[in-house]
Image (spheres, grey):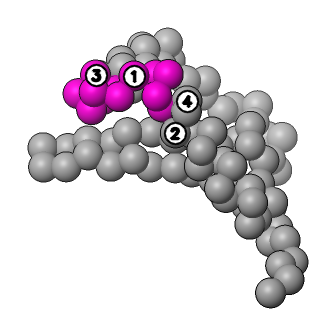
Amino acid sequence: MSWFSDLFKKEEQSGSIAKTRLQMVLSHDRGDISPGMMAVIRDDIIAVIAHHLQIDPESVVVNLDQDERESRLVAQVPLQQAKKREL
């Protein structure tokens, strides 16, 4: 049945995509973290986690979420499978 739902799946509107991009730009500006710094932070997070777990570095997403009271750095790191560690 998945091919049927894929057939009628709505594609994301360009306005929605533009809104998401604008929100990302604004959150980076408010957090005073440049896109280059976000790339460095993302690479550091990948290096640390990849040392202990198997991950797909290409699928890691790091965002800065903000509301009125606080800012949060959110990393989404899909795990593949744990490496066996020798203690």
What label sits on residue 34 in the rendered view?
1
Q: Which residue is mark 4?
A: 39
Q: Are marks 3 and 4 in contact (CB under 8 Å)?
A: no
Q: Earlier in the sequence, mark 3 or mark 4?
A: 3
Q: As displayed, is residue 68 above or below residue 51?
A: above
User: Label 1's element?
Assistant: loop
Q: Which residue is mark 3?
A: 29
Going by the numbered disc 2, the residue's amino acid type is Ile
Farthest front residue? Answer: 87
Which residue shows up at 63% across the image and 39% down it? 43
Real-space CA distance between mark 2 and mark 1, rounded to the nearest whole angstrom? 11 Å
What is the magenta range?
Answer: 27-38
**What crowding class fits label 3: few (fewer than 14 Cα within 10 Å), some (14-19), or many (20 or more)?**
few
6 relative position to 61: left or right: right
Q: As displayed, is residue 30 above or below residue 53?
A: above
Going by the numbered disc 1, the residue's amino acid type is Ser
Q: Earlier in the sequence, mark 4 or mark 1?
A: 1
Real-space CA distance between mark 4 and mark 2, rounded to the nearest whole angstrom? 5 Å
Real-space CA distance between mark 1 and mark 3, rounded to the nearest whole angstrom? 7 Å
Q: Position of residue 45 (x, y in %)?
A: 59, 49
Q: Which residue is mark 2?
A: 41
Q: Position of residue 1 (x, y in %)?
A: 82, 50
Residue in front for this viewpoint, 86 or 16: 86
Going by the numbered disc 4, the residue's amino acid type is Ala
Residue in front for this viewpoint, 59 or 48: 48
Real-space CA distance between mark 4 and mark 1, rounded to the nearest whole angstrom? 9 Å
Q: Earlier in the sequence, mark 1 or mark 3?
A: 3
Camera-near label (1 vs 3) is 1
Q: Are marks 4 and 2 in contact (CB under 8 Å)?
A: yes
